[in-house]
Each structure stands twice: as C-alpha cells, then as structure tokens.
Image (cartoon, helix red, strand yellow):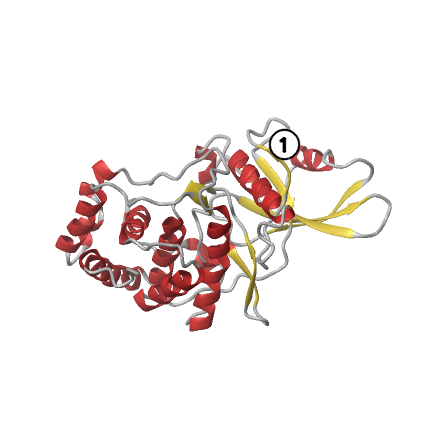
C-alpha cells in the first residue's frame, strides 16, 4: 500500500485539536515487517509543517502475525522518553522517536498503527565500512545498556526465536561444509545461559535501524523499537554482529565487539549470546540476502558470500568457546 486510507487519516487528525492538514505523505524505504510513512502535517492556522512517522501494519505484513505488537514499541518509546527527560541519558547524543499515539489492534485506525515523531538523519550502509564507522555504531547503543542495567523497564522479556530443544535439527546442518562446528554451538545452547544484568535492549540493533549525520560521522538516532524488551546486552551486540558478518565479514563484527567492550566496561562477553543470534538468523530456511539492504542500495552481496562468511564466523565462535580472548 503506497498511501494511507481515509480511516487512518481521520485517526491521525483526531490526535490534535483544531485544523490538521496532511501536507504530504511519503512511503519510506526499508520497511520490511510493516509499512512506514513520513507524514508532513500542518497544525493550526500557521503555515509551519511538522514531520511525523506512521507505522502501519497491513494484513500482508509479517508483523500482523504478532497481535498487539505496536503496544510494545509504544511502551518502549515512552520509557526512553522518560529516561531522557529525567536526564538519565543526558550524556547520550542519540535520540529516539517519541510516541504520539498508537492503535495496537486497529480499532480506530482500521489497521494497527503507531504515530511517532520524525528524526532527521540518514541510514549509512557503506560498501566497505571504516573502523570508525564500526566504533561509532557500537558506541551508540552501549550507553542505553549502561543506563538501564538491572532495571526491568517494560513488561516484555527477551526470548530466543529458535527453541533450544529443536535447534539440534538446525537448517545449517544440511548446507554447512563443517557441521561438526555447528554441533559444538548447538551443544552449548543446550546448556544453561550465562548470568547477566537485564537492561533495555533494542532486540533488532543493526545498521539499517540507525540514523547518521554522515558529515560528522555521528549517530543521531536509533529507530524501529518494535521488538524492544528487557534482556541481556549481549543480544544487541550479537544481533548486530551477525548482521555485520553477513554484510562485511568476521573482522568487521570483531571490531564492533571490541569497540562495544570499550564503551561498556561492565559488560562481560560470552559467545553464548552470539550463538543465540546466529541460530535465530539462520534458523528459518536457506541463506538469503536481506531485502532491506538491497532496497537501500547495498550492492554486490550474494547468498554464497553470506554463507561463506557465516562459516568463518562459526569457526571463530567455536574458538571462543574454548578460549575466550575477550575475557577480562
């Protein structure tokens, strides 16, 4: 759907008193699990226009399978706003969208919808990342973990998408040239998880959910908090690492990890969380290139490249199980 319908438009207008004019509606690139729109809205009698973002979950969108999911994103955004307003993130230059309104089940808007503020910034997806880019990417998320450590801030907790008991039949065993390495990781996932200090995690932290001021080489916003929850910081680290492995290779993922460890000295690295994220990412079928990357112009990446990089990552994780070089 390339535009919003009249019922959604009426719901949007109802969030303000007085005259509300939708000056422009623009479909945004990159929305894979739901439809994303930039709304330029003229409020009141002035000619000033403010920009907002609408997340709309269409019946064909994958998020439609998770009933009421937008209530989770709304709660996380509001909690982040509370933290910022209270000064608990005062040293963090990164901003987050603010929730204006949401209709989790589409009772008023027709379909599940969330209206939030618009953040300036660009997604940065270089063909070859510089070390500084990787370091800044790690430094952007670490302060949130530190500021929220040992606080259960929202009523949702992390869980793995791949059931540990069923992981012994993981799809990678059918295509990997080194299934014994995968079995070592699968054996580890059957064992108890390491202890951790729960914090607020993004749960889908990776480059296309980060907005940059590229001229200043600075992250200015983190978006798409629909999966936000309480959980181990290692999941945000591990999820970003497996994305970086696919895009760029193991060295990029390790540079990111090293930068994160510097930015969050209290963090105790354990490859267990990387394994969880790897199994989640590869547990639902053959290796494919993520559509969101190609929509945003990333070129020259093929499934065989990703498969080879993942195999190298598995080898590195197996080595870390035996000798964790990141131990303090």
Left or right? Give the position of 175 relative to 84: left
Q: Is residue 182 visible?
A: yes
Q: Nearer the viewer, residue 245 or 297?
A: 245
What percent of the width, then of the height, locates residue 246? 34, 60
**Residue at the spot 17% in from the left edge and 46% down from the top edge:** 187
**Residue at the spot 68% in from the left edge and 33% down from the top edge:** 11
User: Which residue is most to the right?
Assistant: 45
Left or right? Give the position of 150 relative to 252: right
What percent of the width, then of the height, locates residue 17? 80, 35
Residue indicated by mark 1: 109
Q: Nearer the viewer, residue 184 or 230?
A: 230
What percent of the width, then of the height, locates residue 22? 74, 45
Image quadrant in which the N terminus is located: top right
**Residue at the spot 20% in from the left edge and 42% down from the top edge:** 191
Q: Nearer the viewer, residue 84 or 316?
A: 84
Label 1 element class:
loop
Quadrant for residue 326, please give it: bottom left
Q: Is residue 54 visible?
A: no
Image quadrant in which the C terminus is located: bottom left
What percent of the width, then of the height, locates residue 124? 51, 64
Left or right? Give the position of 101 relative to 135: right
């Amino acid at each position: 759907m390339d535009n919003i319908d009249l019922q959604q438009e009426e719901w949007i207008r109802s969030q303000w008193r007085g005259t509300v004019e939708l000056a422009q509606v623009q479909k945004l690139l990159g929305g894979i699990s739901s439809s994303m729109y930039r709304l330029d809205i003229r409020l009141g009698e002035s000619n000033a226009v403010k920009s907002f973002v609408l997340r709309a979950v269409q019946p064909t969108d994958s998020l439609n399978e998770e009933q009421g999911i937008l209530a989770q994103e709304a709660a996380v955004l509001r909690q982040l706003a509370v933290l910022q307003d209270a000064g608990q993130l005062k040293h963090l230059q990164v901003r987050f969208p603010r929730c204006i309104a949401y209709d989790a089940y589409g009772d008023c808007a027709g379909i599940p919808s969330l209206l939030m503020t618009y953040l300036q910034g660009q997604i940065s997806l270089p063909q070859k990342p510089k070390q500084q880019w990787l370091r800044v990417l790690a430094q952007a998320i670490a302060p949130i973990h530190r500021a929220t450590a040992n606080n259960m801030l929202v009523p949702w907790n992390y869980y793995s998408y791949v059931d540990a008991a069923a992981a012994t039949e993981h799809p990678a065993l059918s295509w990997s040239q080194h299934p014994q390495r995968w079995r070592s990781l699968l054996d580890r996932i059957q064992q108890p998880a390491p202890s951790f200090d729960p914090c607020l995690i993004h749960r889908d932290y990776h480059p296309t959910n980060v907005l940059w001021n590229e001229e200043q080489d600075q992250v200015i916003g983190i978006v798409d908090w629909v999966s936000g929850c309480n959980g181990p910081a290692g999941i945000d680290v591990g999820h970003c690492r497996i994305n970086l492995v696919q895009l760029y290779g193991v060295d990029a993922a390790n540079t990111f990890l090293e930068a994160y460890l510097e930015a969050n000295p209290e963090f105790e690295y354990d490859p267990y969380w990387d394994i969880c994220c790897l199994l989640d990412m590869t547990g639902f079928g053959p290796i494919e290139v993520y559509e969101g990357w190609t929509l945003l112009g990333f070129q020259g990446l093929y499934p065989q490249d990703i498969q080879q990089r993942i195999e190298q990552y598995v080898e590195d994780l197996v080595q870390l199980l035996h000798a964790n070089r990141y131990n303090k």
